[in-house]
Image (cartoon, rainbow, N blue to C red):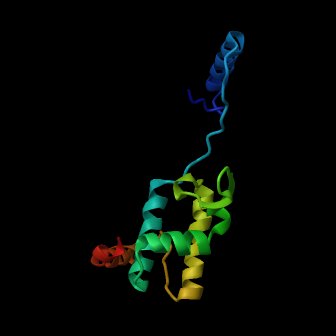
Amino acid sequence: MLYSLSNPLDVQNARTRLELLIKRGCTVEITEKKAKRTLNQNAYLHLLLGYFASQTGNTLEWVKQQYYKKLCNPDLFIGEKQDQFLGRVKYVRSSADLRTDEMNLSIERFRNWSASEAGIYLPEAVNEAEIAAMQIEVERYQTYLY
């Protein structure tokens, strides 16, 4: 059950439920639910990645993994864990796990890197005419991006 602890009614319901579970001696897990990224952010990110891929001759997946995640945002996407057979290994986190603020930061870093290092301008989401032009370009190269 999800409870919004900013809502007084949910706070009371959560307390009542927890007290009942304590009385029963249950095992429980309490998890904070953080804001996930928005669908608009996801669509915008994939448009940027697709456009960059169309301009560089790479696949969208290559651009996403190598440039966006590993090069521009390693602190957000590259993690390490201990594996019982392999020892200490690195893994790449999914962008679906990012919070809204992390997604904003990662997109901004990619846009800045693209302009300064690759010489490819990627417009802000509010530039509707430029976004529409990018969509046309990505659709034109759709066959080669995947």
**Front-lying residue, 110 or 64:** 64
| Rendered position, 23 above or below 123 | above
Query: Image point 46% across, 60% down: which residue?
Result: 42
Residue under the point 60% across and 29% down: 3
Residue 106 appears in which quarter of the rendering?
bottom right
Hey, which residue is sitting farthest front in the picture?
85
Residue lying farthest to the top in this orientation: 23
- Which residue occupies the foreground of this view, 120 or 40? 120
Q: Position of residue 76 (x, y in %)?
A: 64, 62
Depicted 67 relative to depicted 87: above or below: below
> Does 26 sit left or right of 61 as displayed?
right
Residue occupying the point 58% across, 58% down: 93
Q: Position of residue 38 (x, y in %)?
A: 50, 54
Residue 71 screen position, x and y as percent: 61, 75
Please report the residue visible at 66 percent of the width from the left and 29 percent of the height from the top.
29
Count of number-bearing discs = 0
Q: Is residue 106 left or right of residue 42?
A: right
Image quarter where the C terminus lies is bottom left
The answer, for residue 127, to whether it is visible in the render is no
**Could you tell me if residue 138 is visible in this image?**
yes
Reply above or below: 22 against 111: above
**Image quarter of residue 17:** top right
Q: Quadrant of the N terminus?
A: top right
Nearer the observer, 19 or 67: 67
Q: Position of residue 67 (x, y in %)?
A: 54, 75
Please state if 78 lies on the left or on the right of 139 as rendered. right
